[in-house]
């Protein structure tokens, strides 16, 4: 018969820490002891427990930063590695991939260099009406591994988390809001960026493409260089050329090559230089800021007095306004404000950014706007060349060679046609059209463009010849008029001289 075990003998076998928790759980149910227990239990546990608790909050205390970047990295890391051992998970899709996250209050273990740590997602609900629950990751580890875990391990988690986020990241294209945006609304609105353009299907000279790709890749790996020379990690590109030459497609290809987000900045929707600075501050790193048709967006000409004149006019208008008027009309973006946007102190808030201007008329831009240091590389987007045509033929017709390519090459050498127009003629117009039909359409279009171009050149020559003829006739008339005036003056002088001689003879 088994001997009955007493309650006291059971308690004597319990470890001291477990006994302490047991006693505290009993005492805290009694009101007189509740406050006392809650006040001193945590302090006593801290003195006895050899473990350190490290908390990573969801949001940063800095309002400028918003979400805590370390929290996001930890969440991505645990979703990738902790999901293998966790029993309670959340699943979502990100970037077309299935992404796991550990559920609230779920605990997972991780091992780093033989040291075991424990992670848990803690959710706190504040006793305040309409308040949102706050979340924080709690990391528990033994205090003798403090330096290892708080140093190398956290660096490892952050690095791995960044890689996971980058792998699953959905790139965005952002557009700035209009002038009537409320102060409380976001300055940028975004949609997913899924443009298919890349440098392989870009219709331009292969050597120029190779040069641009090398320049972009070199920039993306030059963080240490920019830090060493003391410059902001950014680079400016000016894309110029006629319409339809692929300037917008080039921007998309750049973004896809580097994996950057795109900010499509519409300057006509910006009310002031101050709002322009706010827009810049609210852009992310690893992004392209594109301002298309810069020559049409603002009155950015070679006249440097345009800013001062407009400022003086605004000051006069403000002085002449009534005292009851409190609202101030938007002054718009000035040239100096745009220059500060590109390379002023505000442009150094966060690095790894590319600023791109596109224009159809580079000669209209102020030299200060496109000088080196602001627009570091000027890229001419010209008319379609034969190499560009071969890229289009491969994309649209799946042809790498054809007997009619020679005729097209000869026509492209003397004809100005944009890649967009060439592609339009290669697209089959009817379901039964074949490759031959597309090439024939292009040849006819090139021949017509060549004829039109020759007619325009001939008309220009005739116009120029006519202008020169008119100038010669006008010059001849001027010379004849001047000669007549000289003859009249000479006749007057002769008449005066004859009158003087007659007067002298009469006197004698």
Image: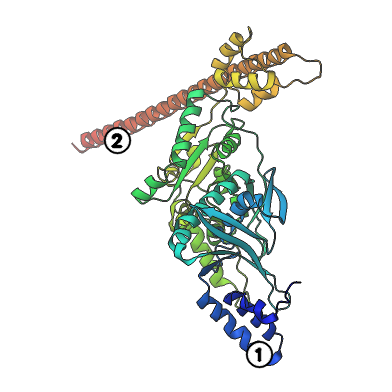
Instruction: Please report the residue visible at 47 percent of the width from the left and 43 percent of the height from the top.
Output: 236
Please state which of residues 44 and 421 is positioned toward the viewer in this rendering.
Answer: 44
Residue 33 is marked as 1
Residue 272 in sight: no
Relative placement, left or right, of 333 versus 395 is left
For the point 47% across and 41% down, which residue is it? 220
Q: Residues within 10 Å of mark 2 (few under 14, many from 20)?
A: few
Residue 64 versus residue 275: which sits nearer the camera? 64
Horizontal and vertical percent for residue 303? 46, 49
Q: Where 103 sits versus 357, above or below?
A: below
Q: Indicate the secondary structure of the residue bearing disc 1.
A: helix
Residue 231, how many percent across, how many down?
38, 50
| Residue 459 position within the rendered picture, expressed as x and y whole percent measured from the top left | 58, 20
Measured as percent of width and height from the top left, residue 207 is found at 48, 24
Q: Nearer the viewer, residue 19 or 289?
A: 19
How much space separates mark 2 and mark 1, taking CA atoms?
135 Å
Left or right of residue 246, residue 155 in this image: left
Outermost residue, right side: 431
Q: Is residue 260 above or below residue 309?
A: above
Image vertical order of residue 245 relative to residue 266, above or below: above
Q: Earlier in the sequence, mark 2 or mark 1?
A: 1
Residue at mark 2:
496
Image quadrant where one finds the C terminus: top left
Instruction: State if disc 1 and disc 2 touch (CB < 8 Å).
Output: no
């Amino acid at each position: 018969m088994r001997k009955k075990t007493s309650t006291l003998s059971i308690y004597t076998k319990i470890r001291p820490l477990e006994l302490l928790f047991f006693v505290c759980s009993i005492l805290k149910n009694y009101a007189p002891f509740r406050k006392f227990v809650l006040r001193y239990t945590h302090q006593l546990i801290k003195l006895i427990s050899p473990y350190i608790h490290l908390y990573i909050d969801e949001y940063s205390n800095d309002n400028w930063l918003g979400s805590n970047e370390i929290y996001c990295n930890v969440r991505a890391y645990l979703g990738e590695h902790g999901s293998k051992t966790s029993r309670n998970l959340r699943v979502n899709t990100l970037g077309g991939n299935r992404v796991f996250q550990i559920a609230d209050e779920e605990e997972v273990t991780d091992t780093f260099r033989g040291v075991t740590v424990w992670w848990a997602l803690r959710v706190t609900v504040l006793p305040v009406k309409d308040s949102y629950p706050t979340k924080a990751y709690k990391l528990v580890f033994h205090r003798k591994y403090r330096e290892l875990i708080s140093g190398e391990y956290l660096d490892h988690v952050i690095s791995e988390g960044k890689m996971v986020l980058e792998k699953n990241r959905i790139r965005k294209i952002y557009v700035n809001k209009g002038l009537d945006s409320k102060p409380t609304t976001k300055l940028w609105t975004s949609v997913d960026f899924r443009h298919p353009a890349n440098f392989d299907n870009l219709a331009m000279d292969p050597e120029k493409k190779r040069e641009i790709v090398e320049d972009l890749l070199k920039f993306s790996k030059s963080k240490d260089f920019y830090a060493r020379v003391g410059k902001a990690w950014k680079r400016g590109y000016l894309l110029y050329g006629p319409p339809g030459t692929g300037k917008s497609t080039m921007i998309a290809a750049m973004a896809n090559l580097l994996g950057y987000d795109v900010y499509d900045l519409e300057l006509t929707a910006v009310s002031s230089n101050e709002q322009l600075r706010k827009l810049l501050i609210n852009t992310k790193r690893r992004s392209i800021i594109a301002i298309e048709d810069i020559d049409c967006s603002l009155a950015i000409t070679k006249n440097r007095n345009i800013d001062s004149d407009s400022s003086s006019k605004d000051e006069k208008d403000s002085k002449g306004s009534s005292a009851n008027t409190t609202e101030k009309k938007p002054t718009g973006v000035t040239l100096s404000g745009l220059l500060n946007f590109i390379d002023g102190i505000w442009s150094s808030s966060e690095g790894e950014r590319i600023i791109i201007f596109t224009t159809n008329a580079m000669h209209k831009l102020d030299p200060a706007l496109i000088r080196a240091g602001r627009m570091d590389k000027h890229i001419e987007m010209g008319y379609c060349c034969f190499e560009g045509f071969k890229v289009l033929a491969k994309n649209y017709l799946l042809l790498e060679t054809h007997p009619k390519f020679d005729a097209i090459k000869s026509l492209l050498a003397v004809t100005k046609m944009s890649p967009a127009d060439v592609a339009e003629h290669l697209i089959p117009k009817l379901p039964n059209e074949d490759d031959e039909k597309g090439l024939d359409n292009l040849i006819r279009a090139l021949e017509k463009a060549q004829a039109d171009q020759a007619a325009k050149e001939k008309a220009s020559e005739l116009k120029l010849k006519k202008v020169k003829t008119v100038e010669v006739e006008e010059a001849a008339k001027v010379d004849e008029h001047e000669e007549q005036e000289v003859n009249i003056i000479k006749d007057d002088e002769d008449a005066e001289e004859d009158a003087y001689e007659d007067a002298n003879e009469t006197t004698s």
